[in-house]
Structure formats: C-alpha cells, structure tokens
Amino acid sequence: MSDREQPLPPRREDVQLNLFDEGELDIADYLRDEADETVALPRKQGFVALTVGAVGVVYGDIGTSPIYAFREALHPILHDAQATRPEVLGLLSLLIWTLILIVTVKYVAFLLRVDNRGEGGVLALYTMVRLAIGRRSVPILFLAIIGAALFFGDAAITPAISVLSAVEGAKLVLPGVEDWVVPVTVGILLALFIVQRKGTKTIAGAFGPITALWFLTLAGLGIWHTVAQPEVLLAFDPTWGVRFLLEHQLIAFTVLGAIFLAVTGAEALYADLGHFGRKPIIAAWILLIFPALVLNYLGQGALVLAHPEAMSNPFFSMAPAPLLPFLVILATAATVIAAQAVISGAFSMGRAAIQLGLLPRLTIRHTAADQSGQIYIAAINWLLLVGVLWLVLGFGSSAALASAYGIAVTGTMLVTTALACLYVIHARILPMPLAILLVSPIFALEGVFLASNMTKVLDGGYVPLMVAFGLGLAMWAWWRGTQLLLVKAHKQHVPLASFVRSMERSSAPVVPGTAFFLSPDPDIVPSALLHNLKHNRVLHTQNIILTIETLRTPMAEPEERAEYQAYGERFGRLTLRFGFMETPNVSRAMAQARKAGVKFDVMRSSFFLGRRRPVVSGPLTARRMLDRLYAILTRFAADPSDFYHLPRDRVVELGERVAV
C-alpha cells in the first residue's frame, strides 16, 4: 500500500481478520453501474448545520442533567428542609468546576484533538493505542472491553432516568397523575424503541432545534432567578467548593456522586466526533451548552436560597405556573432525544465492537441511504429495551435510579483517560513523565468521583456493574474463542503456495466459472476449498481466496479497499479492507476488486463459506466455561451470507465441527 498523509498507516500485523459482515446489493445489481462506487454518499453539511446537529445529538444527555443533578446533590445536606447559604454556594461551585475540569479541559480542550481519522470514542482510542504500540497487548484489550461494556451499562440507565425525571414533572401540573408516572414512562420508552427499526432520519432533523430551544429555556430560567439573587455568582470562586468538602467530610463522597450527574453524557462529545467534527462540537459547547448549564444551576441555587420549599424539585419550580406545562412537555421531548442519542450511540459502539472481533456478528441494517452512521441492530435494541423497562419498573422513580447512575460513566471516563495517556506516551507526543504529570489531576478527580459513586453500589449501583460484567465476559469469551479457533486452524493448515503447485499436476475435473472462498487467513487453503475438492471432486476455472480485513482505522481509503494477487492460472488471492466504523459490503466492494485486476463473470461465480461449529467437552473448569459461552454466542451470530450481503443465490456453505 502506498503511503498516505494520515499518521500510523495500517500494516499487515495491525489488522484483525474477520470473516463476517454485511452489505445490501446483489453483485449483478451493483455492477450495472460500476462508476457509482460510493453509492449515496452523505451530503456535506455546513458548519452551522453541523453545530445545530451536535446540540441535539452530542449534548442531549448532559443537557437533561439539570432536571435531577442539583436536586440529588441537595438531598444529603438537607436539615430542617433547607440548606444554608454556604452549602448552596459550595454545591454550585462544585457543579461549575466539575463542568469546567471534566468537560471543558479534558474533552473539549484535549481529547477532541486525539482522533483516529476523525473518529472518537473508547474503541477508536483503543485502536490508536494498539497501532502506537505496534503489537497486541492483552491489558490494553482488557481496558477497551471494560470501557465498551461500561458504555452499554450506561446506555441502559440513561433512557430510564431521563424520561422518568421528565414525566415526574407532570405531578406539579396535575398532582393526581402520580400513579401514572411509571405507566406513561413505559409507554414512551416502548414507542421509542419500537420506532428504531424504521430509522430516525425523519425526526432527527428536529433534534437540534428542539434541543437548542431546551438550552435557551434553561438559560432564560437561570438568568431570571440569578438576577433576583446575584450572590450566587460567588460560586465561580472554587474556594466555596473546597470549603464545602472540608466542612462536610462525612457526606462529601455522597454529595460528589450526585455532583457527577451533571457531567453524565460528556463521553458523547468524544464518541460522536466522527459524526459532526471537532469544531462544531466545540462551538456548540462554548457558545450555548456550557453557558446554559451554568446559568440554570445558578438559577436553581438562587431559587433555593429565596424559597427553601422548592428544594424537593428545584428545576421545575423555576417556571411560573402558566409556563409549567410547556416546561414539562419540552423536558419530556428533550429526554426522549437524549435517550435516542444514547441508543444510536449503542448501535455505533456495537458495530465497532463487532468489527474489532469483540462481539459476534449481528445483523446490521442501514436506515438511511445518505447517512452511513444511521444503523439499526435489532439484538442490541431489544436487549436495551428489556434492561430499560426492568430499571423503570424495578426502581420506580428517578431519585431511586440516581443511585444506580454514574458508576458506568465514571468507569468509562477513567478508561478513556488511561488510554489517552498511553497513546500520548507510545506515540511519543509527550515524554512519559510530562504526560503522567498532565493527566494525573484529571485521573485523580475521576477516581474520586468513581469512589463516591461506588458508595451507592448496594442502593442500585450494582445494576450497571452487573450489565458491564456480563457484557465484558461475553466480549472476552468471543475474542478468546475466535483466536483459539484461528490457532487450531493454523495447526492443521495447508500452505496456499504449496497447494497451488500441487494443483498444477492435479487430475481433478475443471468446471467453468469463478469460485470465491472466504478465509480469515490469505496464506492458507480455506477448509471450504479442501471440502469442495474432497466431496465434489472438482476445481473451478478460477479459484480466489477472499479475505476480509478490518483495519485499525475507522475508514478505509478507496485505493486500499481491494488488493489482488494471482497465483498461477487458476488461483488468486483477493483482500477487501474496511475500517472498523464501516459496515463491510462485499457486493459493493467487488467493483473495486475488478479495478484491482479480478476478472470474473457475475453469473458464473459462486461464494463458498466454511462454517466452523465449536464443540466443547471435558470437565467444567473456568476455561471450559468460557469455551461454552463462546459456543453459545456462535448460535446467535447472524448468517455470514446475510451479514456480508453476498449474492443470495450464489452462496454455498460447507460446515465442520471443531473441538475447543
């Protein structure tokens, strides 16, 4: 491959070989118009459109935090149903400086500049560290698995607590509807998850404007109450926060766990980097999101100082009675958008995990022709729905769910910080002592937040930990099982070069046409080819070993998509490359294969798949339990021909049982 301008170009040892993925078009349909190689490229959006879009998608989660964050921070310090002036100012100072240090400094100022060809998120960061190190590292892999698993744990809690907190605001308008809060929340969530299969393109255009209106409302309410109590502006002085922690040492950890609710959703800034770009995300934060959040928290603090009776629900108490119904409706819309952003993020994280070999292949369906990032994964959607409904029905209120919230987010943030530090060191951007010196304060702060959230494990914090443990175990079992099968296949392998030489003297009958044999290793003979010779006793005129490589970069460049090498008259090796954020499509990629030198007749071609079914035997040890889990997971994997969208009437599958 030729050198390109991006750093750390992919190398042979830096790719994870995958045998599965999906596409959509039949080869015969697609090759009728080979000139259209990219098929419906997404339209380029302007800076303003991207910024408004980022407001709706990137900041949906963190934007709903004012509904419950300050309320939960107040509860541990209440005495005689009120809080003192120093306590309110101390809480506000902690909220403001948490937003500054975690979001502005870590994510906006630093992490958004650390991207993998424009993509962000914990798995993108993992691939950068992997490339910088230049070899496989199991500890780094463990970090990536932990980060991805914790993200999914957070994805189950966010829709539940966000929608519950918004619907609870209706009690202020209609006190008699308290018994309907949970049923209405369940109905909203059911509708939200059911419409996922149809895609969100038709409503996504409204996300940005609605969320922008939400933030403007937050700012307006905050300004109104801050003007009445301007002393809350003293909270910008960090000494108020330090003084609060020193004077309330017994409950400081509990309070910090609630304070951290204000930055849940900050990881989305980094995860959605590839969708909107660095500058629109930064502009949205500096010009709208950060000022609106700070003003609203100041306004809530001012309201509590002036009217202590508002402490039970300071956010909705900010609105005058005539505007309260509007605020409840707007808050509900904002929380639904926040939940949608988390669900979409779970789909994207799932696709990246599949491409990196951390999850079994799952059917991925595109829901918008002009938006490659809009995908739908049914398995993840329904599993999330079950988890979300269980949380709503089990906890019953946003206050109860707040105890379960935060652990997964802080864990993911710590993993991101650790991976970023490792990347800076191994990529030689900074010397190790300086990198550790710069990262240590943020790492220590997030460590304190994690410790404070861990105090809530028995009150509900066990939920995201259980979810993360289960998913992490499944990811490790899948990766481990896949590697074991590859090692076993290598032990029994037949080198391709020697096989080609032996076939030159073979008397096997030759039938016309081209046979593509999918293989995870281009240097050995696929089992499907050996079985075809053994059972059918024929050889095709042209036999091509087809390997799908998932690069450690988010997108493959057009010139590196296909590479072909001929071996004699009847054999060849074709490699198709895709980035880990792409959904590989063999059918579409065959156009580039032709340009790379592959000559074939579409109607006289067949695709042969060798399917291995793992068989587990022996005593039940820890390793055998992982093997059994791997065998179970293989049953849920999507059919490889559907997953890759190979020509539906030209696929031949040959199976074998493999002992693990």
Image (cartoon, rainbow, N blue to C red):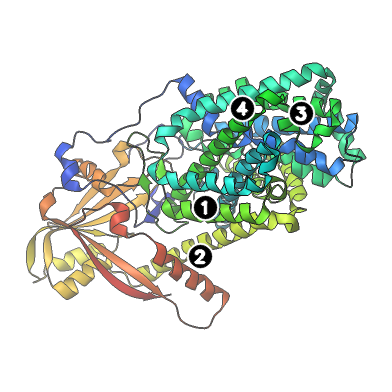
Q: Amino acid at mark 3?
A: Gln
* Residues at discs 4 and 1 in contact (Cβ within 8 Å): no
**Compared to 317, does 587 lie above or below?**
below
Crowding at mark 1 (Cα within 10 Å: few <14, some 14-19, many 20+): many
Q: Which residue does the numbered mark 1 point to in the structure image?
A: 385
Measuring 29% from the left and 63% from the top, which residue is drawn there? 524
Mark 2 vs mark 3: in front: 3
Q: Which residue does the numbered mark 2 point to in the structure image?
A: 477
Q: Which residue does the numbered mark 4 point to in the structure image?
A: 326
Q: Amino acid at mark 1?
A: Leu
SS label for mark 2: helix
Q: Position of residue 171 (x, y in %)?
A: 69, 39
- C-alpha separation, residue under disc 3 versus residue under disc 1: 33 Å
- Displayed quadrant of residue 286: top right
* Residues at discs 1 and 2 in contact (Cβ within 8 Å): no
- C-alpha separation, residue under disc 1 versus residue under disc 2: 24 Å
Mark 4 vs mark 1: in front: 4
Q: Which residue does the numbered mark 3 point to in the structure image?
A: 300
Q: Amino acid at mark 4?
A: Phe
